[in-house]
């Protein structure tokens, strides 16, 4: 690729964010139990209650951030920008209005911008966690933000 993009590497040991809306929490807990043998080899992060419930019910270690409505989704998004989170599993509830919907959309957007794999349901999460890339490094192209900032500053 040209210098408009940079290559980032997702390491063999993934940093996985686990998030779920209230009605989806039992599903993500079950998913974590079903995939605990894989998940225990990675670094796990989560928003508030989801992180706590997963840790309590599965025995997996999960670093918790704030609850989603209290900024947890934005904290996860910031960790994507910082290069900490490189894989997101977010069981969202498509049938219930969420008070923090703009935060959820911002998280999804930042995952797209940084080319981070993101599952929003169990089927996608199953495909991702059983992918051949779970046990290897993965190189992906991300916008060259330094170049982008430099060009924007020069044009103003």
Image (tube, rainbow, N blue to C red):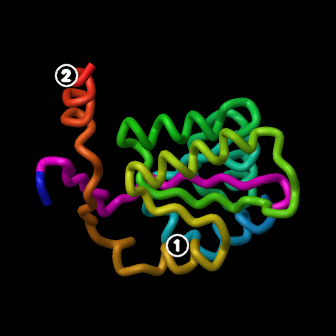
Q: Which residue is mark 1?
A: 37
Residue 11 magenta-highlighted? yes
The mark tally for this picture is 2
- x%, y% of residue 134? 39, 71
Q: Which residue, given by chain and number where applicable, does mark 2 sit on?
A: 154
Residue drawn at 72 percent across, 55 percent down: 20
Q: Is residue 101 above or below residue 154?
A: below
Q: Which residues are magenta?
A: 3-24
Q: Residue at x 35, y 59 (%)?
A: 13
For the N terminus, give its image quadrant: bottom left
Q: Is residue 66 magenta?
A: no
Q: Earlier in the sequence, mark 2 or mark 1?
A: 1
Q: Nearer the viewer, residue 80 or 47?
A: 80
Q: Residues within 10 Å of mark 1 (few under 14, many from 20)?
A: few
Name the mark on residue 59. none
Q: Residue 69: image x %, image y %? A: 76, 36
> Where does residue 97 sit, x and y in percent of width and height?
86, 51
């Amino acid at each position: 690729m040209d210098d408009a993009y940079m290559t980032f590497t997702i390491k063999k040991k993934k940093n996985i964010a686990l998030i779920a809306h209230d009605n989806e929490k039992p599903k993500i807990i079950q998913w974590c139990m079903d995939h605990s043998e894989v998940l225990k080899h990675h670094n796990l992060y989560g928003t508030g209650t989801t992180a706590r419930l997963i840790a309590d019910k599965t025995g997996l270690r999960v670093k918790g951030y704030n609850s989603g409505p209290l900024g947890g989704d934005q904290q996860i998004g910031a960790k994507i920008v910082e290069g900490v989170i490189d894989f997101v599993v977010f069981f969202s509830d498509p049938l219930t209005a969420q008070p923090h919907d703009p935060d959820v959309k911002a998280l999804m957007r930042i995952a797209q911008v940084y080319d981070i794999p993101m599952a929003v349901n169990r089927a996608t999460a199953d495909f991702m966690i059983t992918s051949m890339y779970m046990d290897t490094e993965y190189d992906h192209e991300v916008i060259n933000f330094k170049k982008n900032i430099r060009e924007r500053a020069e044009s103003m």
